[in-house]
Amino acid sequence: MPNSGGQQTGVKSDRRLQMLEAAIKQHQYSKDALLEILHTAQELYGYLDKDLLQHISRQLRLPPSHVYGVATFYNLFKLKKPGMHVVTVCMGTACYVKGAENIVSTIEREFNLKRGGTTSDGRLSLFVTRCIGACAMAPNAIVDGEVIGKATPEDVLRKVKSAMGAEMVEAR
Amino acid sequence: MKPDELRSLAQKESELRKSYRYRINVCCSSGCMPFGSLKVLSAFKDAVREFGVEEECYVARTGCVGTCSLAPAVLVEPGDYLYQNVTPEKAREIVKEHIVGGRPVKSMLYGNEAFFKKQLRIVLRNAGKIDPLRIEDYIAVGGYYALLKALTRMTPQGVIEEVALSGLKGRGGAGFLTGLKWRYVARAPGSPKYVIANLDEGDPGVFANRTLAEADPHAILEGMAIAAYAVGSQKGYIYVRSEYPLAVQTLKKAIEAARSMGVLGDNIFETSFSFDVELRLGAGAFVAGEETAILASIEGRRAMPRPRPPYPAQSGLWGKPTLINNVETLANVPVILLKGSEWFSSIGSKNCTGTKCFSLTGKVNNPGLIEVPMGITLREVVFDIGGGVAPGRRFKAVQVGGPSGGFLPEQLLDLPIDYESLTKAGAIMGSGGIVVLDDTSCMVDTAKFFTEFCVDESCGKCTPCRAGLYKLYKVLDGFTRGEGSVEDFSKVEELCEFIKEASLCGLGQTAPNPTLTTLRYFRDEYIAHLVEKRCPAGKCFGNSGGGGVE
Amino acid sequence: MSKPVELTIDGKKVTAKEGETILEAARRNGLYIPALCYLEGVSSFGGCRVCVVELKGSPRVFASCVTPVTGGMEVVTDSEKLRRYRRWAVELLLAERPHVCSVCVANGSCELQQLATELGVDHLRVDREWTDYEVDLTHERFAYDPNRCILCTRCIRVCDEVEGVHTLDLMLRGKNSKVIFDLDENWGFSRSCTSCGKCSASCPVGALYVKGKPLSEVKKKDLVSFIMERRSEK
């Protein structure tokens, strides 16, 4: 049974919630499992909104402020819905030394958004990350999950535009 | 699994391995994977079939060889022929010429012999030579023999003594004697006890632990099991960065394989020793690699460090005695038990035995993952193994130890790599990052970059790190625009001293290193910014990217 | 049960209880060590670093509120170095957010202000930040101005350990850390808050306060005795 106990939260009762409940149950409603549960929730929903966090806090019997504090402490957890496409630029040491900043500022300029933000039409998010570990291929960028090594601003821009273009074609 | 079963499996597997005349190892680690490793792997398999040499040539999917700039890299045994930037087309040619024709394809070979010559691979002994997803591959090269030896022929005390005598120090950065740490946990009252393998390699520019996990996950598991036996633990956790999906997957599969093989689980090798391992994923917090923060994170809390004492050895996970070791430390352990502490302590320098893995990156010709004996000089690493900087460029500085490591100038390149020498010079061993900078890098800007990193990663608990580092960042940011004066230097140094001395954990205590060392060794660059209002590397004052881009 | 521990603080022989911190031992013996995030009766945090002391034989400094006493320990609570470090801690806290005493409800009874006077902080050597957090006036009796918060977490600990509800916690991290109610809700809409007022009573500065009333010292002393009573009942 999803949403056990008939508790009213703003989370829609669907397959994702069932899977989340299963994960919580598997961890035996343990407070220690908060991080694992947040991981699962983000995988299922893409991001963690307040309704979802409220729900998790009830199920694990943790104070809401504690859950919110943990979810915002770790960079990986997103509390806002990311754009349809995501470009992440590695700003680890090796990438920075090899000019990653230029890639970031090029994307920022071209799409009029700031790092960490999403375009107003919700189509593209730009994130920076501290080291994806592919330092020998620096600088690296990730466009919708695909890694581009030894990237130039032009490479990344091209990739982003083609990803967004493909979606435009699909939409027709 | 019974002891005899391990022996017979090892024999069978190593005979199988020997039955092939050639072995083609295709690197499928995160460094090579994005550049088409899997296509190359299947191309090799197709070609071997096409030329009908399946019986004599084995194609393996392996972890990293270390030459990450050659992606995808392929290693052909015997002879360790290393092919670079292999494509599916090249794969077919390699099979045709090298395997069938017996003539290595010289034009595709990696030319730099020094890259391997000066290295000594203990931790990375199997990296790039076994299939990490096949536990049988690990067993074929002697895997889990050390665990068998420990469980059947040594007492927990004896294991601790052996590790202590080897002189092995923690490879996570602080360099604490591993044997001593084990002894503290073993003697600590309380049960259950826990073992944590720290794979929260958050330093930007460091990928040694990730590579190890991707290439040889069982070395970590075996090391953990031995440690657990020594300290009296039955439960271990590997805390791994969630930014390392391939390492996570590889470890997951390795744990499953080890369980079904019976080298993890109940009554291992028919002894009374039981041990199991679980993975715990980080979520993007550098500070979580700190000993007490890792505990908070595994317990599902904000990864904020707490003061020590009590040390995790006395009061760790859920208040129980807990051993926390870096995965590189643990991977050394099986070898030490098999070859003996005397052998291990003969490697490296007197006070610093064994080897250390380094991620060599930045403006260096041959970036990659290396493992060198302790005591080797920085010059050998940067110039012999790394091949120096690009033609026409001048070496400027090398940073050792990750974001809070210091920058060392040319005149200190003959410094031997060991914990003491590095700390004395203002750098740290850290978790093993070496970043090379040439004359296109601005030291003021670079110091600012690393300070900004630490500002972002500070947990915010203590004033020096939270508020102090941010002020330091603001001052450095001003310097890059020529704002400020040389009179500010003493203020900056005093602030740095406060942050270093009064911060709660290692993050704050080391974060001022980049600023302090650049102020010490590259003061003229600061003066150029503040007095002459110019950036010698042409990077600051709005010339964005002038120095950065190739 | 607990054995007495002998140590010296500034050359004076002091007897402490086993497991006690240096700060507790000093205060019980009538010796003064300045402190800020420390609050008697709740757990220690060790964050502000104002209570740092030196220990003979160690080059480092230690936060006395979280460092347990050991036999034979020689504690130095006042030195040129310690004064310098404490001054930096207070200066950085003052510069971290816009602390302007003249327009603060805590003016005159602010612990940060008192420390600044005591340590001779008469100007700031670093630029001040002008953070622009919204002031939360949604609660009928209390107000919260994050711009005056020094992140000492006293309120969080009191709410959790004394009132037992854990309405408050920290969100984000580093310099962006902020004390929040529930899921970063406005105070007036917090479902878990019992409006007990202990958080505002424990605030050393003017971040959490009772609307329309200047902060008075009397109230704070009340809080400490309340906490201690509850402790001894346990």
Image (tube, coloured by chain):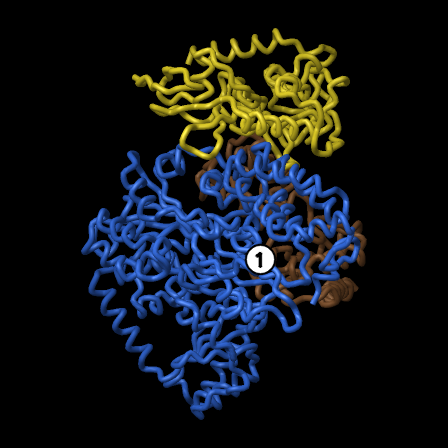
Chain colours: A brown, B blue, C yellow
Residue at horizontal 51%, vertical 26%?
C52
Residue at horizontal 38%, vertical 15%?
C14
Count of numbered circles in the view: 1
Residue A64 image position (x, y, % from top left): 58, 31
Among the 4 quarters of the image, the one containing residue B329: bottom left
B466 sits left or right of C28 in the view = right
A100 sits left or right of B415 in the view = right
Q: Is residue A127 above or below residue C210?
A: below
C146 sits left or right of B51 in the view = right
| Chain hosting mark 1 | B
Q: Is residue B377 above or below residue B424?
A: below
B442 sits left or right of C68 in the view = right
Residue C158 image position (x, y, % from top left): 55, 20
Residue at horizontal 69%, vertical 53%?
B525
Question: Dot 1 lies on which element?
Answer: strand
- Identify the residue position indicated by label 1 in the image: B409
Residue B408 image position (x, y, % from top left): 56, 55
One can see residue B383 in this view: yes
Residues C207 and B425: in front is B425
Residue B323 image position (x, y, % from top left): 36, 44
